[in-house]
Image (tube, rainbow, N blue to C red):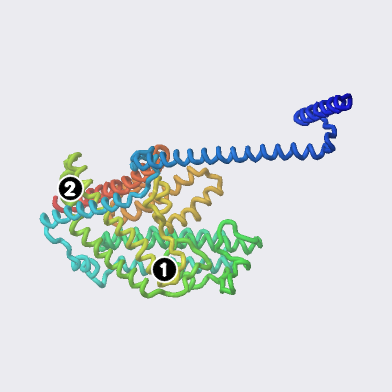
Amino acid sequence: MPHYAQSNSMGDSDATLRRRATFAAGLGGSMQPMNGKSAAASQSSVTADLGRDNGLGKRDRMVETARSNSKSEKHKRRNDISERMSCHKTQESLLSSSSGFSNYRGILNWCVVMLVLSNARLFLENLLRYGILVDPIQVISLFLKDPYSWPAACLVIASNLFILVALYTERQLSKGSFTERVGFQVHCINMVNMLTFPAAVVLLVPSVTPVGGVFVVGTHTILFLKLYSYKDVNKWCRELSSVKAKKLARSLSCPSAQHLNGGERKVYYPGNLTIRDMYYFVFAPTLCYELNFPRSPNIRMSFLLRRLFEMLFFMQMLVGLTQQWMIPIIESSMKPLEDMDLTRMTERLLRLAVPNHLMWLMFFYGFFHSSMNFSAELLCFGDRQFYNDWWNSETVTYFWQNWNIPVHKWCLRHFYKPLLRRGFSKMVSQSAVFFLSAFFHEYLVSIPLRMFRLWAFTGMMAQIPLAWCVGRYLRGNYGNAAVWMSIIIGQPFATLMYVHDFYVLHYRQEAD
């Protein structure tokens, strides 16, 4: 009995100890050995329980992720359905500047079609009113009249004298027979005579027609600019050889040893002072002289024949439009000009603007593209940049810099930059360039017509304030429209003024 009671009390105490140990293990406290089990074994069992708990947590998170994905997919499907059902979104109108739309090819084609139709109507109206006035034989007869007395042709042939004088002067300067001062004086006398002698002949000889006069003074003006460039470049080459400079800062016309390219033969000063070199420059489509021009490899006969056909075609078109379209409008404009009827004068001016501008575009293409490419191809002249995209001009200055590249290069190289180096401001130098251009425009018009009205001079000088106003107040398409307006309206206005004055000066006096 006592033994039984003792054993029972021991069993109760063991159970109590086990419960305490289990409770302590659950609380994470220090564990004592129970029933022969170590603390490490108890810890491993606890870790296994925690692992089971973590596994359950991962599965729960995966279930939650799947549920959220299914919700997002349902939401996306709802958005797709709503987008398919929607027909509106935030956007600008195409004609708004903020839309970024720039493809107006259809509108450009529409403008071309409307231009063709309107001009066709005007041409048909002209035919119905005046009949066919085109007479090529009449134009040819002007050149064949009195074939043994062609003062214009004689003056063009006589221009070779000025060319040879310039070449002789440069040869004497290269040998030291002339001093720089003497050479400068000879060049000045030669070039002044080049402008005054043909002008005096055209003014004093009645047999020189206005067409022949334009051809003569135009030829001598081109030669004047060419020989001025010839004088300057050879002078720069003498300066280069005298000071032993490594390079010529003002021009790349005098190549040094490093400019040899693949063994190509180069010409050096004074080896360029030959008859062949001089006349190549005279006939080359450029106003700026160089010792070594860029050359094309060969002559393309198909290209040459296309340019020749274009030259003949546009020449005939200009003559035909002048006879059929320009002359009747000008003749009908004399009465309103005499009566100073401003309304009819404006109407005649607008009527004259269309054929005048069309003829100016034909002249531009026929001269700057067809004829200059023809001469360049014939001479294997490599630089064919005779014009840039002047039709995109947004300022008046850009137009004058890009529509006639040979003249622009000459003005920049031999007139504008020398003025800057002498200390003049850009504004004064630009004004001087416009003044020089205005002088030659008046020279090319007044001398053949034998009258001085300064309309061309005034028109060119008016480009200075016009360029300032357009550059300051107009931008983009508005500036481009202003440039086109000045071209379309300004030229026929000056033409009408000269024709009116010519008519009053000659035909009215004859009638009286």
Q: Nearer the viewer, residue 197 or 32?
A: 32
Q: Amino acid at mark 1?
A: Ala
Q: Which residue is mark 1?
A: 376
The residue drawn where x is 58% and y is 41% is: 62
Mark 2 or 1 closer to N-term?
2
Q: Nearer the viewer, residue 346 or 52?
A: 52
SS under mark 2: helix
The residue drawn where x is 59% and y is 38% is: 61
Image check: 63 left or right of 194? right
- Callouts 2 and 1 close, C-beta under 8 Å: no
Q: Which residue is mark 2?
A: 334
Residue 147 lies, in percent from the top left, at: 25, 72
Q: Residue furthest front?
A: 1
Residue 484 lies, in percent from the top left, at: 33, 47
Residue 236 lies, in percent from the top left, at: 57, 60
Q: Nearer the viewer, residue 146 or 240?
A: 240
Mark 2 neighbour density, 10 Å: few (under 14) some (14–19) many (20 or more):
some
Residue 237 lies, in percent from the top left, at: 58, 63
Image check: 51 left or right of 303? right
The residue drawn where x is 22% and y is 50% is: 352
Q: Is residue 331 above or below residue 84?
A: below
